Image (cartoon, rainbow, N blue to C red):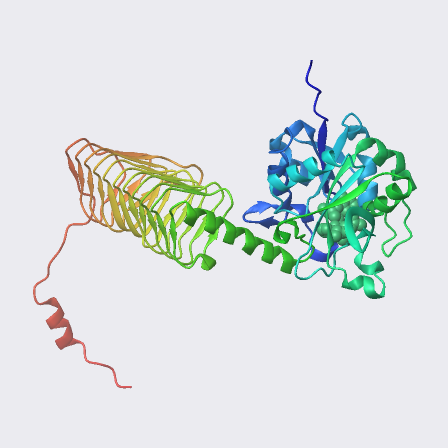
């Protein structure tokens, strides 16, 4: 016998709202927690449950910006040009969703939802052959959420739902109800779209509430059920800046916990900001007040000392980042040591065992194995070979006011302190540049280049001056 085909599921993500309560000029779902837009978290969970082409974000407020930020995920978009409520949003998606038997609805502002929970809603919905399944929760403070009222039979609450009542419409005793609507649902598409046209706007916001469909479906004899989430923390929504901060903290605490369980030491994790997508190898130590941002990957046995901010970088193994380093869009290879106060601007490739020290700034620069630039240096648009010593205060003059030029320093070269290297320029293999030289032309391999005034010594000059120059009366 041929296997019965699985019912088809789409996921719709409600993401068109303005987010009035955030008091922001930017779309709500692009506000970030854990270094990623709220909506990106929801999409990441959704595409673990159904393929991206079955996922539709319903967008409206600043739709182009929202679409541009999520386009790379391969999901579809539906425009809700005017935001007239969550029910109205689902109505706009009718054409996109019609060909699916079921649709799971997620909220763009409920970002911590786990794929496993979405799958549980799907399975509960299928098992109960329900027209609507509502994911509920009992958070410590239910204020602000819609409340779910279940059918009571023989003095006990059942799986079946009578209705959802929004916070502002709660009357008397109803306000005590702790079971909230998470805004996450499963629907059979056929009954949903058969009844959605009956939604009205007789409510505090004069909007079409998707929540009202629960009662409409039940009255039409359809089955509406509720499933309680195990972890109420997963379905918290972001409506205010305080909630944004809370969820960001919650997400980062979870990230830190996962990393620690995987063998990474994080001292005072509550002081560190580690973005969701950061990866760290085992036995690496993260000191207090470190920020690891974006797609940063750190190898094993590294130490990242306090007050360093590392954005979109790849660090090898056994790397030591001393306090106060700022590293961006760069690679740091095994065994390198940076800082304190090293600044890597985008495009650097720092070789194995390299040492870079205080107040050394680099941009679009490669340093070969074992090279050193320990103090007060700027290396821009430079190619530095292996075992090069860049003395304190060395500056590459890479910019002529119009164009940028490259500096090439070959293997084993020695750049004396306070040298200025005016690019384009090449310092050959094993060459020496004398301290305080201003180098404007290439230096051949193994040569010494000196480009500074010769020292003049005038014996006794200072003593004579003191004798001749009397202080003027005050
Ligand atoms: C909604 C539910 C509430 C539930 C809560 C859970 C309704 C009427 N209420 O309230 O029962 O407890 O979520 O977090 O649904 N949106 C659109 N188009 C619109 C309006 C909203 O796409 O026209 C989107 C928003 O961008 C947001 C989501 O729908 O992502 C929820 O809207 P929001 O206004 O935040 O609803 P809540 O008041 O939180
Ligand atoms: Ca909300």
The residue shown at (71%, 59%) is 142
Looking at the image, can residue 83 be seen? Answer: no
Percent x, y of residue 444 = 19, 31
Left or right for 166, reference 32: right
Decide which of 161, 59 is in the foreground and name it: 161
Residue 472 x/y as whole percent: 25, 82
Q: Nearer the viewer, residue 196 or 471?
A: 196
Left-right relation of 261 to 154: left
Counting from the top left corner in percent of width and height, residue 443 is at 21, 34
Which residue is situated farthest in the left direction here? 459
**Above or below for 410 versus 468:** above
140 above or below 468?
above
For the point 43% across and 36% down, the residue is 403
The residue nearer to you, when weighing 50 against 70, is 50
Question: Can residue 226 be seen?
Answer: yes
Q: Quadrant of residue 81?
A: top right
């Amino acid at each position: 016998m041929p296997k019965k085909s699985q019912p088809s599921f789409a996921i719709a993500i409600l993401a068109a709202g303005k987010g009035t309560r955030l008091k922001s000029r930017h779309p709500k779902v692009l506000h970030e927690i854990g270094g990623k837009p709220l909506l990106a978290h929801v999409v990441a969970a959704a595409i673990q449950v159904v393929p991206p082409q079955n996922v539709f974000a319903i967008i409206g407020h600043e739709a182009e910006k929202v679409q541009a930020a999520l386009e790379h995920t391969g999901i579809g978009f539906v425009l809700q040009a005017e935001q007239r409520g969550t029910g109205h949003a689902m109505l706009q998606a009718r054409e996109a969703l019609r060909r699916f038997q079921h649709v799971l609805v997620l909220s763009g502002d409920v970002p911590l939802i786990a794929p496993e929970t979405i799958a549980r809603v799907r399975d509960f919905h299928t098992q109960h052959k329900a027209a609507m399944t509502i994911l509920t929760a009992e958070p410590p403070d239910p204020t602000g959420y819609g409340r779910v009222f279940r059918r009571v039979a023989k003095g006990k609450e059942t799986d079946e739902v009578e209705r959802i009542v929004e916070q502002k419409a709660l009357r008397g005793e109803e306000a005590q109800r702790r079971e909230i609507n998470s805004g996450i649902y499963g629907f059979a598409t056929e009954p949903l779209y058969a009844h959605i046209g009956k939604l009205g706007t007789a409510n505090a916001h004069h909007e079409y509430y998707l929540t009202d469909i629960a009662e409409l479906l039940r009255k039409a004899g359809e089955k509406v059920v509720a499933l309680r989430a195990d972890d109420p923390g997963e379905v918290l929504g972001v409506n205010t800046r305080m909630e944004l901060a809370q969820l960001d903290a919650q997400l980062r605490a979870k990230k830190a916990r996962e990393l620690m369980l995987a063998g990474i030491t994080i001292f005072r994790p509550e002081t560190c900001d580690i973005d969701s997508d950061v990866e760290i190898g085992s036995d690496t130590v993260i000191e207090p007040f470190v920020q690891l941002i974006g797609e940063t990957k750190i190898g094993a046995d590294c130490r990242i000392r306090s007050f360093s901010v590392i954005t979109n970088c790849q660090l090898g193994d056994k790397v030591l980042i001393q306090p106060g380093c700022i590293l961006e869009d760069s690679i740091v290879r095994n065994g390198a040591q940076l800082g304190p106060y090293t600044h890597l601007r985008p495009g650097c490739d720092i070789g194995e065992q390299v040492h870079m020290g205080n107040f050394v700034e680099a941009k679009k620069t490669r340093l070969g194995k074992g090279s050193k630039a320990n103090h007060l240096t700027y290396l821009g648009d430079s190619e530095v070979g292996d075992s090069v010593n860049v003395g304190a205060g060395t500056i590459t003059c890479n910019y002529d006011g119009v164009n940028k030029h490259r500096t090439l320093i070959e293997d084993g070269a020695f750049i004396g302190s306070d040298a200025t290297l005016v690019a384009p320029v090449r310092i050959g293999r094993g060459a020496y540049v004398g301290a305080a030289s201003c180098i404007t032309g290439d230096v051949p391999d193994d040569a010494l280049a000196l480009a500074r005034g010769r020292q003049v010594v005038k014996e006794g000059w200072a003593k004579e001056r003191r004798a001749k120059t009397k202080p003027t009366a005050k």
